[in-house]
Amino acid sequence: MSTLTKSKSAEPKAAELKQYIGGKWVHGSGDREIVSTNPADTRKIIARFRSASRQDALSAIEAAQMAWPQWRAVSSPARGRILAKAAEIARARRDELAALMTREEGKILSEAKGEMDKGIALMDWFSGEGFRLMGQTAPSELPKNLLYTVRQPLGVVSVITPWNFPWAIPVWKICPALVAGNAVVFKPASLVPAMAVELVKIFEQAGLPPGVLNLVIGSGSALGDMLVDEPRIKAVSFTGSNEIGKQVHTLCGKRGIKVTCEMGGKNPAVIWEDADLELAMGGVLRGAFGSTGQRCTATSRLILHEKIADGFLSKLISEIAKIKVGDGLDPAVGMGPAVDESQLKTDLDYIEIARKEGAKLAYGGRRLEQGELKHGYFVEPTIFDGVKPSMRLFKEEVFGPVLAVSRVRDFGQAVELANGVEFGLTSAIYTQDISLAMRFVDKIEAGMVHVNSPTIGGEAQVPFGGIKGSGVGEREMAKEGLHFFTELKTVFLDYTGQRRESNLY
């Protein structure tokens, strides 16, 4: 691919993007032109587009409302086949789109390819769900009465997604919504518009009817309320910050509509004294510094048993020192940039806060600006030791490559520290003691738990989501993700053909 060469002349031309409303690609009518740049080198423009306005969002909702009755009437297996076709198209374009993702979002190419694979697997999974969109039968107390349930679509739903997984997260929301028979209005983060456009093009090429999927790209402040408050919106699926997620949840609660909000994390990895330390080392490196720490499932807290703490931390630092930071298209690079200037500032601000609060800087902590790095948003992978529960770095999500290390003496203390934050998304423990592992599984306050594997990761066939401040509403992916986009209807069918009285309530 030409995008992988270092020649300046080979840099792809900036894309001129449009909104997708009612099956047509149209310019936004907002008052801002938005320019998307490569976070590894801000001199390189990925895309330009005119932002969507509230009127554009309204037009998208109207188009979805008009398209929905016909889409609802399509059988769910036929809807699933369109998803299967989309997966086939995406698989053929996997490497090309991964390169685009690296240029637009910043993650290294191997991680972008992994995200492409995950999204394609999700398409495969949900395409099959078209054949499994089943209700249940139940025995009735009445004679000659068929008692059963069916799942039916909701109508028009909105999908609001973040920038850090610009392919996989939209896929795991849009696919179940579509196969269940809903029409979708999709608003991605403005930092990753090109990936969103390519995703919609794939569904368009796969044969999705006009109006069933609509794309509006613009700021959340301009479009967010419309995509939550408009009466024709029957459900909202949101992934983003806790602050915005709580607002979305409140607005949906006032309207009494379905909502799922997947929000932040401050995920602990506990390394016990009997752990396979080499295995744990690899897990911590991937969990804390993969994707530049920019994922809600990142390992942001490391809880070490005091007996192995010094040795493990020393080895961890030596391994981190080997990570090359730079442009993710370079195969030698192990960590890319922060996504934009705002996120870089957040990373650096938390590093300074940790210093002032008395945490010990064990490694990193600087912005990287030497050579070509001066044109991007680069920060060193960073570790603070001696982080106490009262410190902000222990409690607050950074969303960057900044790892907080704490030490414990016993299991009770480890669980207390692991649970001592408002978040509850994911967690990990490394130990060879199955009894200890199962006690951790029982005690940890998190929606997901890993034993001897990193805090990151999920699979299409199992639910994804957290508890406490990490999530509200139903889980995503798997059958739970599909069921969110349906209503369950119970049917009582009396086939006696005779009038009778019943004393059932």
Image (spheres, grey):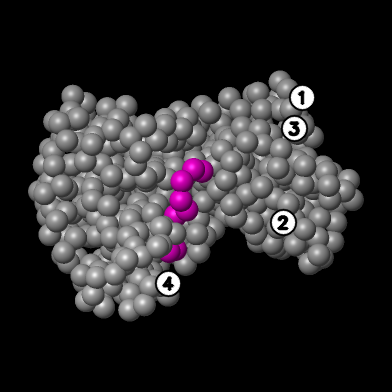
Point out residue 494 in the picture as x, y percentages from the top left corner: 28, 72
Q: Is residue 290 left or right of residue 256?
A: right
Structural distance between the alpha carbons of marks 4 and 2: 39 Å
Quick check: marks 4 and 2 in contact, CB under 8 Å? Answer: no
Q: Which residue is mark 1?
A: 358
**Other-residue count near label 1 (Cα within 10 Å), few / some / many at <14 / 14–19 / ≥20:** some
Q: Which residue is mark 4?
A: 141
Q: Which residue is mark 2?
A: 442
Residue sitting at x 83%, y 47%? 412
Q: Upstream in the sequence, badge 2 or badge 1?
A: 1
Structural distance between the alpha carbons of marks 3 and 4: 56 Å
Q: Which residue is mark 3?
A: 389
Question: Mark 4 or mark 2, which is nearer to you?
Answer: 4
Which amino acid type is shown beneath numbered disc 4?
A: Glu
Q: Secondary structure at mark 1?
A: loop
| Boundaries of the magenta span | 471-479
Which amino acid type is shown beneath numbered disc 1?
A: Gly
Q: Secondary structure at mark 3?
A: loop
Image quadrant in which the N terminus is located? bottom left
Which amino acid type is shown beneath numbered disc 3?
A: Pro
Residue sitting at x 72%, y 56%? 442
Structural distance between the alpha carbons of marks 3 and 2: 22 Å
